[in-house]
Image: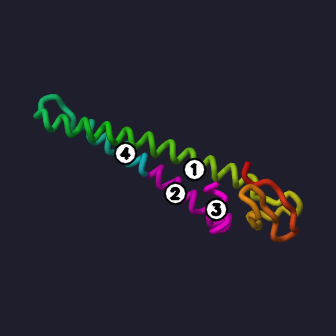
Amino acid sequence: MEPADSIARLGFARWYERRLIEGHAWFVSCFLCMIAIAACMEELNLRGSLPRLAVYATLVLASAALAVYAAVRYHRILSEAERLGEHATCGNCGAYARFKLYSPTMARCRRCGNEWRLIN
């Protein structure tokens, strides 16, 4: 019920904007982790000391794990925003994002009073 609570509190347009910002912040995090992996792999060599090798290997593994997590979060957030964005238009008058949630799943248009299921 998290999207319903946030949409009811913020309104759909502001909720949608914040979800897109959060999703793209995860994308930037994933991209920065890829840069960190490339930089560490470039510095990684078997001629250095064992502690240095361990630090770079740990950084590569941690960055890879964080990059995978960030990519999954990015995909989930954008999928959720897109799914709800497709249902945010009133079928009766065509108004976009002009509704009020009156239950955790149902929306009522502010312009014409039409009701529809926003969240499945």
Q: What residue type is labelled 4?
A: Cys
Magenta-drawn stretch, dominant element (helix, strand or loop): helix
Labels 3 and 4: the sequence-earlier one: 3
Question: What is the secondary structure assignment of the residue under circle 2?
Answer: helix
Label number found at residue 33:
4
Image coords of residue 29 (percent x, y)? 42, 50
Does residue 14 appear left or right of residue 120 in this picture? Answer: left
Mark 4 vs mark 2, CA separation in Å:
17 Å
The 10 Å Cα crowd at callout 3, few under 14, some 14 to 19, many 20 or more, is few
Q: What residue type is labelled 2?
A: Glu
Mark 1 and mark 4 residues within 8 Å of each other at the beta carbon: no
- Residue ID for mark 1: 77
Image coords of residue 46 (percent x, y)? 16, 28
- The residue sitting at 77% across, 66% down in the picture is 99
- Residue ID for mark 2: 22
Say which of 96 and 65 sits in front: 65
Question: What is the secondary structure assignment of the residue under circle 3?
Answer: helix
Residue 94, quarter of picture: bottom right
Instruction: State whether residue 14 is above or below residue 51.
Output: below
Labels 3 and 1: the sequence-earlier one: 3
Say which of 17 and 31 sits in front: 17
Question: Which label sits in the foreground, 1 or 4?
Answer: 1
Mark 2 vs mark 3, CA separation in Å:
17 Å
Stretch in magenta = 1-28
Does residue 67 appear left or right of residue 13 in this picture? Answer: left
Question: Which label sits in the foreground, 4 or 2?
Answer: 2
Mark 3 and mark 4 residues within 8 Å of each other at the beta carbon: no
Mark 2 and mark 1 residues within 8 Å of each other at the beta carbon: yes
Mark 3 vs mark 1, CA separation in Å:
16 Å
